Image: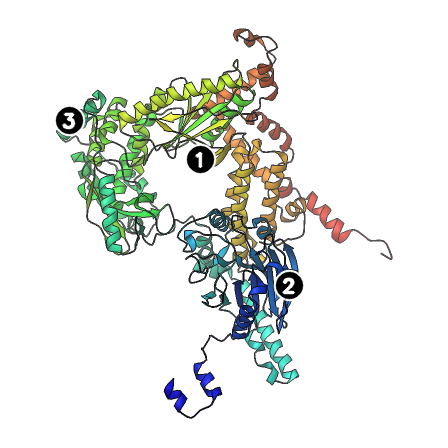
C-alpha cells in the first residue's frame, strides 16, 4: 500500500486496482435469477440495491420481505410485484427487468406466481416463503404442475437428500412430494443459512436440467444470496443477439430464417421412420429409464461418526457385517425339537451318495428356453445372455454334465459361490443394516438348480403339499386372492357396529436369510420328500460361500451357514415348505399368508358389546402372540417387532385399542397399513390408496408427454402400445378392489384413464365419452369386465380362496330368506346387533354379478360399434345448417 501511495497515480486507478472482481452476468446467454431472503426489506435495502447493480439478474426473488410488501420500494431498471405474508418476516416479492414481459397469474399468502414471456418459451416463475414449523403449499404447487414452472424461495425444509445434516417435517414432506410428482430440485452448491449448514433456500422445477447455482457470501441478512442460471439461451436466443447493429430489414430476414430452420428441425425431429425405430430401438431407449423401477446405487456407508466412500473400506465393512449375519445361529440345547433337527441334519452328512433320476434332454431344453438374456455377470464371469446364445448342439453336452452331477446326487461346489451386490433401502448413504443383498449365482448352476426345482414342484403338486392360507411362490396362487379374502373377512366382521376385527401384520426379520438349515431339513423329512431329493437339498444348502462386490472391489470370501441366497428360484420354494406348519399352530384363527408376509385376523363376537369385544380381542391377541413366540423359537426365525403392526378395523366412532405385546414389547397400532400393495385402513376407506395410485399414473403421463414429442400421431400404434404397456397396468391394479370404491371414486379413475387416451391420440378438449368414441378404444369398464370374469372363475374353484368362498357363503346365509339358522344362535329374535349385521353386510361378488348383468349389453360398444362415431360425424361435419346462420 505504501508503494502504491508513493507511486504516481490517481484515485481512479487505485479504485480500479482495489475493486473486487465479480462474475459478470451475460444476459444474452442464459436466464439469470437472484434468490435472497432479506429478513425485512426495509432494513436491507442497501444489500438488495448493491446486488442488483453488481449482478444485474433478469429476475430477483425476495423472500421474508416483511412490511415492505404493502409499499414495495422501487429499484432502477426493475418492476416489482409483492404479496403479503403471515408474520413479520413473511411475504414475497419478484423484481424483473423492464424488457422482460411478465404478468401475475396466481397469488396467495407467502406465494406469488408470474408468467414470464421469454423469447424462446413461456415459463411460470414463482416466489415461495414457508414460515418455520409450516408445511409447503403443495396444493398451490400441484395446481400449476401441468405447465413449465420454477418455484424459488425459502422453504425452511431440511433433508439429507439435499445435504442437510438433519431432517425436519417440512423436508420429509417435500422429499415425498418430489418423489410422488417426479419434479426436481435446483440445489445450491453450499449452505444458504448463516446460522447453520442447512440448505433451505432453493428452487423446485419440473425440469432442473442445465441449471447452475452459486451461493454469494455477501449481505447482512441471516441468509446468503443465491444466483441461479440456466445453461441454455432462455432469456435471449442467439439469433437475436447483436441485432441493434443490423438494419431492420436484415434483422427481420435473419429472425425469419432462424425461426423457419427451428420449425423445420422440430418437424423433422417428430417424424420417426418406423423402420429406423425398429432397427435402432429408439422408443424403448427413451421408455426404459423413465418407467423401469430402479433402486438407486448407494455412494457410501453411513457409520456412527462419518460416511465411508472408499470401495475397499466398504466391501470390508460389508464382509464383517454379513459374516455375522450368516453365522450359525445359537440353538437351545434343552429344546428337544432343536436337538432332533440337528441330529437329522448331521445324519445326512454321513449318508452315502444317492443318485437322482436321470435328467433328460427335454428338461434341459425347457429350462434353457426360460433364460432371460441378461448381460450381468455372475461369480464366474458368465452371463445369461451367453448361455442363451448357445447353439442347440451344445445342449446335449450340458445334459451329460448335469447327469454326472445327478449320478453323484449332490450339487457342484463351484455353483455354491455367490457374488453378492447390495441395493440400498435408505438413500445414497445407508447403514449396513439398510441394504438388500442380491446373490448373483453362476448361471450354469442356476440352470441345473431349476431342473431340480421343477421336480420338487412336481412332487408338491402330486401330494398336494400346500396350505389354503398361503398364496405366492406357486403357479395359480394369486396375490389378489389373498387381499380379497382378507378384506371380505374384515367387511363381514365389521358390518355389525359392536364387532371389530383386530389384524396383526407380522414381519419376520430377514426371513430368507434366517432360514435355519436343520429345521428346514426336519420339516422336509416330515413332509415325506423323497430321499434322493432331500439328500440333494442338503448338499445344496451346505458349504455355501459368498463375496461382496462394490464397484471394482471384491471382499474376502465368507461362509453362509444360515439362510438361502436371494436370487435363487429354489430359495422361495424351500421357504414356503419351511413354514408349511405355521397355519396349524393358529387353529381357529383366520390367517392369511403371502410369501413371508403373515396377517392374523381376530374377530369380535356378535353377542358381545363393543367394550367387551375389545377385551375379548386383547385376550385372543395374547394367546396368538404366545403361539407365535413358541413357533419363532422352534424354527429360530425371529420376528421384527418394530415392523410388526396392529390394525383395529371397526365401524364405531372412537373405540379403545386392545393392547398387543410380543415378548414384553408393545406392538404399535396404526390407522392404515399397506398389505400386498393395498392400503387397508381402520374404516376400510380407499381414498388414500386410490390417490397414491393416481399420482403414479399422472407421473407416468408426464413421461409419456416427453416420449410422444418424438413420435407423431401417424404412428399411433406405437403410441398406443406404450400407453398400454406402462399406464394401463397401474389402472388394472385397482380392479381387484374396484367394487369397494364409491361411484365418485370410480368416475375419477375412469377420467384419468380417458386423460391417457386423449394424450395418446392427441384429441384434447373432449369429454370422456367423446374421447372413447373418437379413439374407438375399450372403456375402462370393458377391461374391468374381462378381468373379473377370469378372477371370479379362479375364486370359485381355487383351494387358496377357501376364506373368500366362506365369506360368500356367510353373505348368502345372512341375506337369504331361510332364517332357521337363527335358532342355533343364542340371541333374541330382534337382536339389534344381528339386525344391523344383516342390513349392512356386503360382498364384492354380489356387486360383480350386478355389474356383469348391467355391462354385458354395453361390452365393447365404443370399440366395435360405429353407431356413436357416425352420430358424432353427422353432428359436427355433415348436419346441414340453416341459411343465414
Image disc number at residue 81: 2
User: In front here: 347 or 670?
Assistant: 670
**As drawn, which residue projects farthest toward the bottom?**
8
Vertical placement of residue 484 versus 232, above or below: above
User: In front here: 137 or 757?
Assistant: 137
Q: Give the structural element (helix, strand or loop) at label 1.
A: loop
The picture quadrant where one finds residue 248 is bottom right
Q: Residue at x 52, y 7 (%)?
A: 824
Q: Earlier in the sequence, mark 1 or mark 3?
A: 3
Q: Quadrant of the N terminus?
A: bottom left
The residue wearing badge 3 is: 347
Label 3 Cα neighbours within 10 Å, binned few <14 / some 14-19 / many ≥20: few
Label 2 Cα neighbours within 10 Å, binned few <14 / some 14-19 / many ≥20: some
Left or right of residue 1: residue 532: left
Front: mark 1 or 3 = 1
User: In front here: 81 or 575?
Assistant: 81
The residue wearing badge 1 is: 676
x, y percent for residue 5: 41, 88
Q: Quadrant of the C terminus?
A: bottom right
Label 1 Cα neighbours within 10 Å, binned few <14 / some 14-19 / many ≥20: few
Amino acid at each position: 500500500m505504501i508503494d502504491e501511495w508513493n507511486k504516481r497515480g490517481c484515485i481512479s486507478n487505485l479504485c480500479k486496482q482495489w475493486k473486487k472482481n465479480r462474475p459478470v452476468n451475460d444476459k444474452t446467454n442464459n436466464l439469470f435469477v437472484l434468490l435472497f431472503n432479506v429478513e425485512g426489506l426495509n432494513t436491507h435495502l442497501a444489500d438488495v440495491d448493491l446486488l442488483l447493480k453488481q449482478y444485474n439478474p433478469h429476475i430477483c426473488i425476495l423472500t421474508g420481505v416483511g412490511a415492505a410488501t404493502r409499499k414495495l420500494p422501487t429499484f432502477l431498471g426493475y418492476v416489482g410485484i409483492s404479496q403479503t405474508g403471515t408474520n413479520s418476516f413473511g411475504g414475497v416479492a419478484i423484481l424483473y427487468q423492464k424488457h422482460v414481459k411478465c404478468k401475475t397469474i396466481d397469488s396467495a399468502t407467502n406465494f406469488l406466481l408470474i408468467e414470464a414471456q421469454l423469447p424462446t418459451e413461456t415459463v411460470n416463475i414463482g416466489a415461495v416463503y414457508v414460515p418455520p414449523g409450516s408445511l409447503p403449499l403443495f396444493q398451490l404447487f400441484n395446481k400449476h404442475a401441468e405447465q413449465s414452472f420454477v418455484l424459488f424461495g425459502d422453504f425452511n425444509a431440511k433433508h439429507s437428500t439435499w445435504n442437510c445434516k438433519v431432517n425436519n417435517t417440512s423436508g420429509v414432506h417435500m422429499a415425498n412430494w418430489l418423489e410422488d410428482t417426479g419434479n426436481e430440485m435446483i440445489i445450491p452448491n453450499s449452505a444458504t443459512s448463516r446460522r447453520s449448514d442447512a440448505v433451505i433456500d432453493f428452487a423446485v422445477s419440473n425440469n432442473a436440467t442445465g441449471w447452475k447455482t452459486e451461493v454469494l457470501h455477501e449481505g447482512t441478512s441471516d441468509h446468503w444470496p443465491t444466483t441461479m442460471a440456466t445453461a441454455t439461451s432462455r432469456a435471449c436466443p442467439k439469433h437475436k443477439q447483436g441485432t441493434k447493429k443490423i438494419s431492420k430489414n436484415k434483422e427481420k430476414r435473419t429472425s425469419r430464417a432462424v425461426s423457419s430452420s427451428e420449425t423445420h428441425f422440430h418437424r423433422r425431429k417428430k417424424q420417426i421412420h418406423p423402420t429406423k425405430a425398429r432397427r435402432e430401438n429408439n422408443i424403448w431407449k427413451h421408455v426404459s429409464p423413465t418407467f423401469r423401477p430402479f433402486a438407486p446405487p448407494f455412494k457410501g456407508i453411513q457409520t456412527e461418526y462419518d460416511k465411508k466412500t472408499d470401495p475397499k473400506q466398504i466391501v470390508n465393512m460389508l464382509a464383517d457385517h454379513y459374516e455375522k449375519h450368516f453365522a450359525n445361529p445359537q440353538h437351545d440345547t434343552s429344546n428337544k425339537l432343536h436337538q432332533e433337527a440337528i441330529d437329522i441334519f448331521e445324519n445326512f452328512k454321513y449318508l452315502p451318495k444317492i443318485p437322482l433320476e436321470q435328467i433328460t434332454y427335454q428338461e434341459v431344453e425347457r429350462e434353457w428356453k426360460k433364460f432371460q438374456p441378461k448381460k450381468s455377470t455372475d461369480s464366474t464371469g458368465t452371463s445369461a445372455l451367453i448361455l442363451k446364445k448357445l447353439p442347440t448342439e451344445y445342449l446335449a453336452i450340458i445334459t451329460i454334465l448335469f447327469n454326472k452331477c445327478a449320478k453323484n446326487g449332490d450339487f457342484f461346489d463351484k455353483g455354491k459361490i455367490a457374488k453378492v451386490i447390495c441395493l440400498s433401502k435408505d438413500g445414497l448413504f445407508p447403514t449396513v443394516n439398510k441394504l438388500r443383498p442380491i446373490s448373483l449365482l453362476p448361471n450354469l448352476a442356476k440352470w441345473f438348480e431349476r431342473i431340480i426345482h421343477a421336480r420338487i414342484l412336481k412332487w408338491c403338486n402330486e401330494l398336494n403339499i400346500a396350505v389354503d392360507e398361503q398364496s405366492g411362490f406357486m403357479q395359480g396362487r394369486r396375490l389378489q386372492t389373498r387381499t380379497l379374502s382378507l378384506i371380505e373377512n374384515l367387511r363381514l366382521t365389521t358390518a355389525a357396529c359392536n364387532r371389530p376385527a383386530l389384524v396383526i401384520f407380522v414381519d419376520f426379520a430377514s426371513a430368507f436369510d434366517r432360514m435355519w438349515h436343520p429345521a428346514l431339513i426336519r420339516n422336509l423329512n416330515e413332509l415325506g420328500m423323497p430321499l434322493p431329493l432331500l439328500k440333494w437339498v442338503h448338499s445344496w444348502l451346505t458349504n455355501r460361500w459368498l463375496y461382496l462386490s462394490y464397484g471394482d472391489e471384491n471382499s474376502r470370501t465368507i461362509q453362509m451357514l444360515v439362510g438361502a441366497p436371494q436370487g435363487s428360484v429354489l430359495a422361495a420354494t424351500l421357504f414356503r415348505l419351511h413354514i408349511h406348519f405355521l397355519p396349524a399352530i393358529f387353529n381357529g384363527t383366520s390367517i392369511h399368508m403371502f410369501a413371508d408376509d403373515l396377517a392374523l385376523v381376530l374377530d369380535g363376537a356378535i353377542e358381545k358389546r363393543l367394550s367387551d369385544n375389545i377385551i375379548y380381542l386383547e385376550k385372543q391377541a395374547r394367546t396368538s402372540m404366545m403361539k407365535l413366540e413358541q413357533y419363532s423359537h422352534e424354527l429360530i426365525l425371529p420376528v421384527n417387532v418394530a415392523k410388526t403392526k396392529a390394525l383395529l378395523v371397526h365401524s364405531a366412532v372412537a373405540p379403545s385399542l386392545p393392547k398387543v405385546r410380543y415378548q414384553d414389547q408393545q406392538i404399535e397400532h396404526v390407522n392404515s397399513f399397506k398389505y400386498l400393495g393395498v392400503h387397508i385402513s381402520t374404516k376400510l376407506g380407499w381414498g388414500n390408496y386410490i390417490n397414491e395410485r393416481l399420482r403414479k399414473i399422472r407421473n407416468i403421463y408426464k413421461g409419456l408427454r416427453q416420449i410422444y414429442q418424438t413420435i407423431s400421431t401417424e404412428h399411433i400404434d406405437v403410441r398406443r402400445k406404450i400407453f398400454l404397456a406402462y399406464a394401463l397396468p397401474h389402472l388394472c391394479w385397482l380392479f381387484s378392489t374396484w367394487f369397494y370404491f364409491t361411484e365418485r371414486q370410480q368416475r375419477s379413475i375412469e377420467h384419468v384413464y380417458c386423460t391417457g387416451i386423449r394424450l395418446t391420440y392427441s384429441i384434447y378438449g373432449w369429454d370422456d365419452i367423446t374421447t372413447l368414441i373418437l379413439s374407438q378404444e375399450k372403456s375402462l369398464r370393458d377391461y374391468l369386465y374381462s378381468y373379473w370374469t377370469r378372477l371370479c372363475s379362479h375364486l370359485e374353484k381355487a383351494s387358496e380362496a377357501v376364506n373368500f368362498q366362506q365369506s360368500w357363503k356367510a353373505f348368502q346365509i345372512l341375506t337369504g330368506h331361510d332364517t332357521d339358522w337363527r335358532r342355533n344362535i343364542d340371541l333374541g329374535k330382534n337382536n339389534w346387533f344381528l339386525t344391523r349385521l344383516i342390513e349392512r353386510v356386503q360382498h364384492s361378488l354380489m356387486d360383480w354379478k350386478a355389474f356383469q348383468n348391467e355391462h354385458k349389453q354395453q361390452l365393447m360398444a365404443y370399440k366395435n360399434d360405429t353407431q356413436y362415431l357416425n352420430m358424432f360425424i353427422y353432428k359436427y361435419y355433415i348436419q346441414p345448417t340453416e341459411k343465414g346462420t
